[in-house]
Image: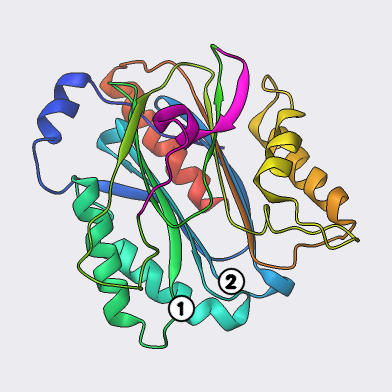
């Protein structure tokens, strides 16, 4: 497991005055991966598997940490198509994300990714995405949804899972379009304050579009029902694998019929630590990268 060091709030607040952030990539790709990371204010686990064992698929995942992890950004995208057929398009999306991922302003970041991707993708393909920025020293989570399946959120206080937009906006649908459909459009953010023990679940449409032997889609309600059956006190990888097994059992298949990615985050207490601890965290993070 990679461990990333932390920074003080004074440093974080001054750095956030800049238009661009100094960040490092922890995860970036569209390949098969199953990994976890411990960062200031949260831990995360990712599972991603391209369709039919392709080297690269149509799902794109990013995790960047800025200012020693005081600000972190997670992005999950899903281009039209799957497997090797979608890999060229997913590369264009990754190029667009990488170009703007360090922008401080999330609305500008998302709008720029959309416009750049639209300029690269000339074959009419589009991509859905959800972007989450977490500022650990303020315990603030900001999300933007570009036509992507709705995130699920576990409230430790209420001890329940629900679709996040229901929690934030009473179920109001977001109007944000997927990337590549139209350049120059704006995107809306929504924010919430998190508590220790809360969890965020991002996933691609393979999970809600899994079908039974009777061709019944699992859908949002079905996925929520399966997720509610998992324990919230277990390790993230155990929770994630339990969700995957439950979906596989529903479809009675050994593999998804699409690229499949699941991104699970559990928030914890933010702690300001010494410079020595911060440098130690970076060393552990680098060791984690080398050992992959």
Looking at this view, is 54 or 5 the one in front? 54
Furthest toward the bottom, the residue is: 123
Q: Is residue 230 left or right of residue 28?
A: right
Circle 1 is placed at which residue position? 89
- Residue 6 is marked as none
* Disc 2/disc 1 C-alpha distance (Å): 9 Å
Residue 174 in magenta stretch: yes
Give residue 55's quadrant in the image. bottom right
Quarter of the image for the N terminus: give it: top right
Circle 2 is placed at which residue position? 57
- The local crowd at label 1, few if under 14, some if 14 to 19, many if 20 or more residues have their Cα within 10 Å, is many
Q: Which range of residues does the magenta coloring cover?
A: 158-175
Res. 55 visible in picture: yes
Give residue 181's quadrant in the image. bottom left
Q: Position of residue 221 (x, y in %)?
A: 69, 41
Q: Do the residues bearing badges 2 and 1 touch, measured as CB atoms within 8 Å? A: no
Tell me: residue 65, above or below residue 130: above
């Amino acid at each position: 497991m990679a461990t990333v060091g932390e920074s003080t709030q004074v440093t974080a607040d001054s750095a956030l005055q800049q238009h661009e952030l100094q960040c490092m990539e922890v995860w970036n790709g569209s390949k098969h991966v199953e990994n976890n990371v411990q960062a200031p204010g949260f831990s995360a686990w990712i599972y991603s598997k391209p369709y039919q064992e392709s080297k690269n698929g149509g799902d794109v995942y990013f995790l960047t940490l800025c200012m020693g992890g005081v600000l972190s950004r997670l992005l999950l995208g899903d281009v039209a198509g799957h497997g090797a057929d979608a890999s060229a398009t997913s590369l264009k999306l990754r190029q667009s994300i990488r170009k703007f991922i360090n922008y401080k302003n999330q609305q500008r970041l998302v709008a720029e990714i959309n416009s750049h991707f639209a300029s690269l993708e000339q074959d009419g393909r589009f991509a859905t995405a959800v972007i989450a920025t977490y500022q650990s020293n303020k315990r603030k989570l900001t999300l933007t949804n570009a036509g992507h399946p709705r995130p699920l959120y576990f409230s430790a206080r209420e001890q329940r899972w629900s679709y996040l937009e229901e929690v934030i906006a009473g179920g109001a649908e977001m109007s944000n379009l997927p990337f590549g459909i139209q350049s120059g459009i704006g995107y809306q953010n929504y924010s919430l304050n998190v508590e220790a023990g809360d969890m965020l679940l991002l996933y691609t449409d393979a999970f809600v579009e899994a079908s039974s032997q009777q061709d019944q889609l699992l859908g949002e309600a079905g996925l929520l029902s399966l997720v509610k059956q998992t324990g919230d006190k277990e390790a993230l990888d155990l929770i994630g694998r339990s969700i995957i097994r439950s979906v596989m059992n529903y479809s009675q298949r050994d593999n998804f019929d699409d690229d499949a990615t699941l991104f699970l985050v559990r928030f914890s207490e933010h702690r300001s630590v010494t410079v020595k601890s911060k440098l130690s965290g970076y060393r552990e993070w680098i060791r984690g990268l080398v050992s992959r």
